[in-house]
Image (cartoon, rainbow, N blue to C red):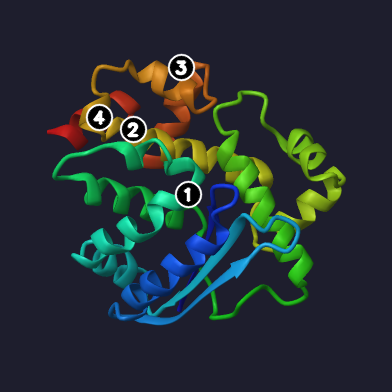
């Protein structure tokens, strides 16, 4: 089983509209092959943040099934207009608009994709802790471009101790540093594969996601993908 959980930062004041759109979007995703269950939870302390929980039979049915099906166009077009990070993209016009929106929404879904036994949350994690993790993930995503982003900065922003933050991530079998690094590398990978960004130097792409040391960025990327950033771009765009 695969449990997918993702954060949706909704534009202030549009939570009700988002919930109405979600009713339609839920029908799209629940009908997908391999989808076992779907739930959207609104944040307790941050009502403009929503967490999506989707249970899939296999990882392939999400990545090769739903993501590559025509349904993602409708799914993305329904939800993207209400999301903070996608606000600028919803103003773009053109025949590929729905595809861009769908890709952007699905990119958010990938942010917290993990394989584990089907369950809503790890044993012992309370609803309050889940809400804290939702806010923490959202904060990290919004600040990945800051080279100074680290555990201390995150803990301070969430008004918790660094040890509390570490325990929060340890319950999911990861560390804060690993999460930040993996999210940065994933964003860089997508930018490198984007033909619209081909004019941006590789080092600038790393820097825009907080990896300002070009050599360090290259080492991290190659360790993750087996190719240097430059080699990956050539391969992805060929």
- Give SS at disc 2: helix
Could you tell which of marks 4 and 2 lies nearer the N-terminus?
2
- Give SS at disc 4: helix
Residue occupied by mark 2? 191
* Residues marked 3 and 1 touching at CB (< 8 Å): no
User: Which is closer to the viewer, label 2 or label 1?
Assistant: 1
Q: Report how far apart the C-alphas of labels 4 and 2 lie in the structure.
A: 9 Å
Pick the residue in front: 109 or 64.
109
Residue occupied by mark 1? 83
The residue at 62%/41% (across/down) is 140
* Residues marked 2 and 3 touching at CB (< 8 Å): no
Pick the residue in front: 75 or 115.
75
Q: Which mark is residue 43?
A: none
Q: Position of residue 123 (x, y in %)?
A: 72, 77
Residue occupied by mark 3? 214
Q: Residue furthest toward the bottom?
A: 36
Which quadrant: the N terminus? Answer: bottom left
Residue occupied by mark 4? 233
Q: Report how far apart the C-alphas of labels 4 and 1 lie in the structure.
A: 28 Å
């Amino acid at each position: 089983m695969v449990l997918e959980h993702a954060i949706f930062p909704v534009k202030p004041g549009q939570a009700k509209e988002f919930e109405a759109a979600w009713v339609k979007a839920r029908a799209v995703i629940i009908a997908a092959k391999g989808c076992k269950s779907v739930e959207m939870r609104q944040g307790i302390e941050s009502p403009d943040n929503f967490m999506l929980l989707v249970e899939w039979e296999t990882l392939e049915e999400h990545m090769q099934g739903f993501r590559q099906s025509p349904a993602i166009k409708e799914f993305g077009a329904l939800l993207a207009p209400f999301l903070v990070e996608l606000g600028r993209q919803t103003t773009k016009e053109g025949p590929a608009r729905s595809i861009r929106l769908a890709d952007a929404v699905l990119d958010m879904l990938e942010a917290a994709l993990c394989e584990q036994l089907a369950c809503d949350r790890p044993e012992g994690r309370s609803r309050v802790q889940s809400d804290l993790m939702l806010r923490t993930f959202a904060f990290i995503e919004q600040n990945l471009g800051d080279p100074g982003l680290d555990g201390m900065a995150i803990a301070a922003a969430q008004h918790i101790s660094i040890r509390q933050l570490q325990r929060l991530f340890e319950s999911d079998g990861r560390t804060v540093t690993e999460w930040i690094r993996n999210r940065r590398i994933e964003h860089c990978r997508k930018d490198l594969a984007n033909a619209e960004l081909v004019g941006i130097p590789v080092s600038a792409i790393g820097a825009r996601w907080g990896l300002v040391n070009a050599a360090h960025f290259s080492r991290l990327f190659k360790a993750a993908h087996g190719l240097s950033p430059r080699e990956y771009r050539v391969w992805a765009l060929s």
